[in-house]
Image (cartoon, helix red, strand yellow):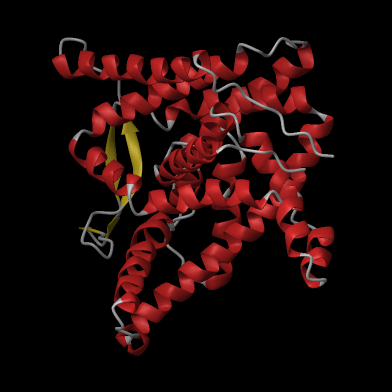
């Protein structure tokens, strides 16, 4: 079932997709949390559930309008169009801000996640023993993931495909950062930095009529990697959405409780006061394709309250939380998408 949307609704939906895409690229921030707070999480899950055997039959039989309406394609195009667009726009700005104002950006994210926990939990009134237990499990899982040590980079295409399946989970599971999972799997730089940079460069050259990339084995390698990763992500989105759609429909309260716990547990990932621990091999810092040091993990510490930067960071935490509360106040209420 599709929903009629005005032009303004479509524009805001595109912006929501933009926000989700930007969040997905930042390690520690969950695009799923963004979609949950901005009110399109369940519609996204149920829309992906519509990519099934019936949709395939509609497509094969040439019933394109029926396929378009059945799969809620307008919604998917707007959300994921915005998400993809963000990788070459908002994400680049975020990369710059993280480099120049790292503490303050992480503080804002930390505040937004705090606000998200309040936003999601304020309407949850089913705090029975079972839901409290699953919430605690969610907290423990979030904490455990935040302290895991990353693996080494692996460009085997089967592993890259699996990275796509698991990495996209940040879009479908609020509280889980797909980018951070890719760091743990050792392939964040390979997939979301180096390969994306090569793809962008290649597309730029193709638009100018330059196809010299076809003679470069290294470029072809990166393009194979990004294509495989994209395929894994698409497969993962469809499969996890079917699973989550089933689970949400039958155990909605339990799922919400574990999401609240998982988001709370993931706060350790976006803790603002941390130092990068870089990968070292044979006593030398490993570098990515752009010559930047490869981050292995983070060393967290408590802030110095005698430092002015600390209070500025706390201000940004408050700002981040207030942004979410304003979204709540001015109408971005969660809307359940009914699968009929």
Q: Position of residue 103 (x, y in %)?
A: 25, 29
Q: Is residue 315 left or right of residue 330?
A: left
Is residue 155 visible to us here? no
| 185 vs 207: above or below | above
Residue at the image point whose x is 75% and y is 12% from the top: 126
- Which residue lies at the image location 25% right of the left edge and 62% below the top edge? 282
Task: Give above or below for 66 relative to 97.
Answer: below
**Closer to the camera in the image, 1 or 185:** 1
Place residue 206 in its image quadrant: bottom left
Left or right of 39? Residue 255 is right
Tell me which residue sits at (66%, 60%) in the image. Answer: 235
Image quadrant containing the C terminus? top right
At which x and y percent is residue 335? Answer: 66, 27
The residue under the point 23% across, 44% down is 96
> Quick one: quadrant of the N terminus?
top right
In front of the other: 76 or 65? 65
Q: Reply above or below: 259 against 201.
A: above
């Amino acid at each position: 079932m599709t929903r009629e949307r005005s032009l303004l609704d479509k524009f805001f939906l595109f912006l929501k997709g933009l926000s989700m895409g930007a969040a997905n690229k930042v390690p520690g921030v969950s695009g799923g949390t963004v979609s949950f707070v901005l009110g399109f999480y369940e519609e996204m899950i149920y829309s992906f559930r519509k990519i099934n055997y019936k949709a395939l039959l509609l497509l094969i039989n040439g019933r394109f309008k029926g396929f378009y309406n059945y799969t809620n394609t307008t919604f998917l195009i707007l959300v994921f169009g915005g998400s993809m667009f963000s990788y070459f726009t908002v994400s680049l700005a975020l990369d710059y801000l993280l480099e120049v104002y790292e503490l303050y950006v992480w503080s804002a994210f930390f505040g937004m996640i705090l606000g998200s926990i309040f936003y999601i939990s304020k309407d949850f009134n089913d705090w029975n023993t079972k839901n409290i237990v699953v919430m605690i499990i969610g907290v423990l899982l979030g904490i455990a993931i935040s302290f895991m040590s990353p693996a080494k980079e692996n460009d085997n295409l089967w592993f890259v495909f699996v990275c796509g399946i698991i990495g996209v989970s940040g879009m479908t599971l609020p509280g889980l950062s797909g980018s951070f999972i890719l760091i743990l799997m050792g392939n964040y730089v390979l997939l979301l930095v180096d390969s994306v940079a090569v793809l962008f460069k290649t597309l730029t050259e193709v638009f100018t009529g330059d196809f010299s990339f076809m003679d470069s084995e290294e470029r072809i390698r990166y393009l194979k990697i990004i294509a495989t990763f994209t395929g894994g992500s698409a497969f993962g989105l469809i499969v996890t959405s079917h699973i989550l759609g089933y689970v949400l429909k039958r155990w909605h309260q339990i799922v919400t409780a574990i999401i609240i716990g998982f988001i709370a547990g993931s706060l350790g990932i976006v803790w603002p006061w941390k130092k990068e621990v870089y990968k070292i091999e044979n006593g030398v810092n490993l570098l990515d394709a752009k010559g930047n040091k490869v981050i292995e993990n983070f060393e967290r510490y408590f802030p110095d309250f005698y430092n002015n930067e600390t209070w500025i960071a706390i201000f940004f935490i408050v700002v981040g939380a207030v942004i979410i509360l304003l979204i709540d106040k001015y109408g971005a209420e969660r809307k359940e998408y009914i699968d009929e």
